[in-house]
Image: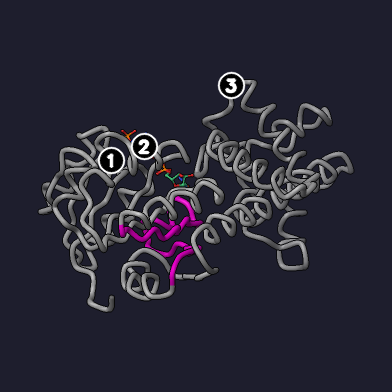
Amino acid sequence: MNESIRQVGYIGLGIMGAAMASNLAKAGFALTVWNRTRSKCKPFAKQGATVADSPADLAAKGPDVICLNVTDTADVEQVLFGDDGVVAGAKPGLIVVDHSTISPMATREFACKLAGHDITLVDAPVSGGDVGAREGTLSIMVGGPDDAVQRLQPMFEAVGKTISHLGESGTGQACKACNQIAVVCNLMGVCEAMAMAKKTGLDVSKMLEAIAGGAAGSWQLANLGPRIAKGDFDPGFMIDLVLKDLGIVDDTARQQRLPLAGTSTAEGYFRAVAAAGGGKLGTQAMAKALENLGAVDLK
Ligand code: NAP
C-alpha cells in the first residue's frame, strides 16, 4: 500500500478541476483525463496527457488514483456508478479522490459500495476558490483510511497548502459543510455591519478598514467587504454554487436535528438574490438582499 503514486486519472476539468489537474501535471504526475465536454481536455492533451473516452475507459487504463471534480452528489454518483462509470472499468486497489463538494451521508454510502469492488474512496473537498486552485494553495479537508491518505500526501501537497485529515470517509465533506456555515454567517455579519455603517452616516470603506485589524477581522470582511463597497458583484464563488452547498448543509442539519438559524437566514438572502436573477453573481451579492430589506445602498 506504500508504493508511490505516478499515474493519475482526472474527471471534471471545470474551473477547479482544470487548475488542480494542471498543478498535478506540473508536479510530475502522469495524467489521463476525461471531461463530459470533451473540448476541455484539449489543453491537457497538448501537454502530453492521455484523453479517455469515458470514466470507465479512464479507469480501465489502470491509474493508481482517479480524482473527481464535478458539481454535485448526483454527478459524483453518475461518474462512479453510471453505465460508463469508473466502477465499470476499475481494477482492484484503485483509490478514488473526490474533490467535489457533496453530501457527507452519500459519501459514506459511496465509500461502502466502492469498498465492495476493492476501491477506496477518499473525500477531499477544498476551500480557497479559483485563485487557490490556480496557485496550489487550497485548504483540503480529507476523510478516508489512514494508509490511503498517507499515500496521497504528495498529490495533496501539489494542489494545496493546508491539508487536514479529519477521520473516516465522509468527514472531509462534513468539515466542508462546517466551512460553508462559517463562511455564510461571516459574510452576513459583514453585510449587516455595512448596512449599519451606511445608516449611521459612516464612510463604509473607512469602517471596514477600522475594524479589519480587530476582533471583527476575517477573510470575508477583508476580501468581499471592499468589493461590496465598490458595487463589484463579479463571481469568485457563485451564489448558485453556495446554494448547492447550503442544500447539503440543510440535509445534514435536518438529519442531525440541528437548528442552524443564522445559516438559514443567510440562505434566505442568497435565495432572494437568485430569485431576482442574481444566481451567477458572486456570494458578496448577498448585500443586495440587505440593501432591499433595509432600503439602503451599501456603496
Ligand atoms: P465547474 O467549473 O462548473 O465544473 C464542473 C465540472 O463538473 C465540469 O467539468 C463539468 O463537465 C463536470 N460535471 C458536472 N456534472 C457532471 C456529470 N453529471 N457528469 C460528468 N461531468 C459532470 O465547477 P467548479 O467551480 O470547478 O466546481 C467543482 C466542484 O468544486 C463543485 O462541487 C464546487 O462546489 C466545488 N468548489 C468550487 C469552488 C469555486 O470557487 N469554484 C471552491 C471550492 C469548491 P462539463 O465541462 O461537461 O460541464
Upstream in sequence: badge 2 or badge 3: 2
| Ligand 1 contact, mark 2 (Cβ < 8 Å) | yes
Which is more N-terminal, label 1 or label 3?
Answer: 1
Around disc 2, counting alpha carbons within 10 Å, would you say few (fewer than 14), some (14 to 19), or many (20 or more)? some
Q: Which mark is residue 85?
A: 1
**Residue 23, position as x, y percentages in the image:** 28, 60
Q: Residue at the bottom extreme?
A: 2
Left or right: residue 83 compared with residue 244: left
Q: Residue 124's spot in the image, x, y percent?
A: 45, 59
176 on left or right of 37: right
Residue 203 visible from this viewpoint = no
Q: Indicate yes or no whether the magenta region holds residue 131.
A: yes
Q: Is residue 1 above or below residue 179?
A: below
In which quadrant will I find the C terminus? Answer: top right
Quarter of the image where one finds residue 160: bottom left
What amino acid type should be assigned to the residue bearing mark 3?
Answer: Gly
Q: Which residues, given as a range, are shown in magenta?
A: 118-145
**Ligand 1: which quarter?**
top left
Determine which quarter of the picture holds residue 71.
top left
- Sequence-wise, the earlier of marks 2 and 1 is 2
* Residue at disc 2, secondary structure: helix
**CB-based contact (under 8 Å), mark 2 and mark 1:** yes
Q: Within the magenta stretch, is there residue 289?
A: no
Q: State the CA–CA distance, disc 3 to disc 1.
A: 35 Å
The disc at residue 223 is: none
Residue type marked 2:
Gln
For disc 3, the marked residue is: 277
